[in-house]
Image (cartoon, rainbow, N blue to C red):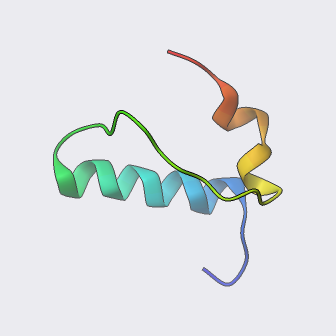
């Protein structure tokens, strides 16, 4: 993607889950502004 935003990050995470066939236990993220969005702070 040309710029970092929440939707692009969520799409990349979704694609990795689909390609691996399982949900990762941990996801390491950058300190970027889009990663700090409330969207990613939700807990299961």
Toward which corner of the image does residue 24 lie, by quadrant? top left
Image height of 38 relative to 1, above or below: above
Q: Position of residue 26 (x, y in %)?
A: 42, 38
Q: Residue at x 78, y 60 (%)?
A: 32
Q: Position of residue 40 (x, y in %)?
A: 65, 36
Farthest residue to the top: give it: 44
Q: Position of residue 36 (x, y in %)?
A: 78, 44
Name the image quarter holding the N terminus: bottom right
Q: Residue at x 63, y 55 (%)?
A: 7
* 14 with respect to 42 (left or right): left
Farthest residue to the right: give it: 33
Image height of 41 relative to 19, above or below: above
- The number of numbered badges drawn on the structure is 0
Q: Residue at x 58, y 58 (%)?
A: 9
Farthest residue to the bottom: give it: 2
Q: Residue at x 71, y 51 (%)?
A: 35
* 19 with respect to 34 (left or right): left
Q: Nearer the viewer, residue 18 or 36?
A: 36
Q: Position of residue 5 (x, y in %)?
A: 72, 62
Image height of 38 relative to 15, above or below: above
């Amino acid at each position: 993607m040309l710029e970092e935003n929440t939707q692009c990050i969520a799409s990349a995470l979704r694609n990795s889950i689909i390609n691996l066939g399982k949900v990762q236990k941990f996801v390491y993220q950058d300190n970027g502004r889009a990663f700090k969005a409330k969207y990613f702070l939700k807990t299961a």
